[in-house]
């Protein structure tokens, strides 16, 4: 009888170990996805901020109406907090700020 109880408990332990390993793999994968999302949001925010500031400076020195460089600067100012939010893990809010900042820059470009 002791042989039958050993074989009954052994598959349950192995199945539980497999389930724990699968859960650990999923947790590591989710952590990696979250890390990539944070880096992407922070990098995109920083890049769009720098691009908006550069475009504002270039348009300021040209013959564009004053509204155009102001729109680029405002769009850059909206994208800057997106970089900070993305770095702290608030990637959804950062995405919406990036979209809003880019839309402000695109709208300002229409006045040129």
Image (cartoon, rainbow, N blue to C red):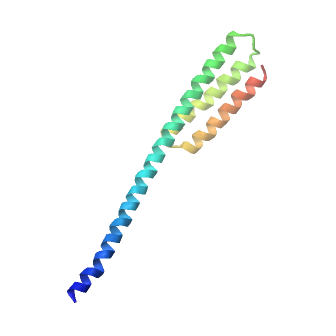
**Is 30 on the left-hand or right-hand side of 100?**
left
Q: Position of residue 73 (x, y in %)?
A: 65, 23
Q: Position of residue 77 (x, y in %)?
A: 61, 27
- Looking at the image, which residue sits at the far bottom? 1
Instruction: Tell me where residue 25 sits by quadrant.
Output: bottom left
The quadrant of the rendering that contains the N terminus is bottom left
Name which residue lies at 65% across and 18% down.
56
Name which residue lies at 75% across and 10% down.
63
Q: Nearer the viewer, residue 11 or 84?
A: 11
Name which residue lies at 52% across and 37% down.
40
- Work out whether 66 lies above or below 97: above
Q: Position of residue 59 (x, y in %)?
A: 69, 15
Instruction: Tell me where residue 5 sits by quadrant.
Output: bottom left
Name which residue lies at 56% across and 32% down.
45
- Looking at the image, which residue sits at the far left? 2
The quadrant of the rendering that contains the C terminus is top right
- Work out whether 42 lies above or below 50: below
């Amino acid at each position: 009888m002791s042989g039958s109880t050993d074989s009954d408990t052994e598959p349950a332990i192995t199945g539980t170990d497999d389930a724990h390993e699968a859960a650990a793999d999923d947790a590591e994968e989710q952590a990696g996805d979250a890390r990539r999302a944070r880096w992407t949001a922070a990098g995109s925010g920083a890049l769009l901020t720098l691009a908006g500031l550069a475009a504002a400076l270039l348009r300021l020195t040209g013959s564009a109406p004053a509204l155009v460089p102001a729109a680029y600067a405002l769009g850059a100012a909206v994208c800057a907090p997106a970089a900070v939010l993305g770095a702290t893990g608030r990637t959804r809010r950062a995405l919406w700020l990036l979209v809003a900042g880019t839309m402000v820059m695109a709208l300002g470009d229409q006045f040129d």
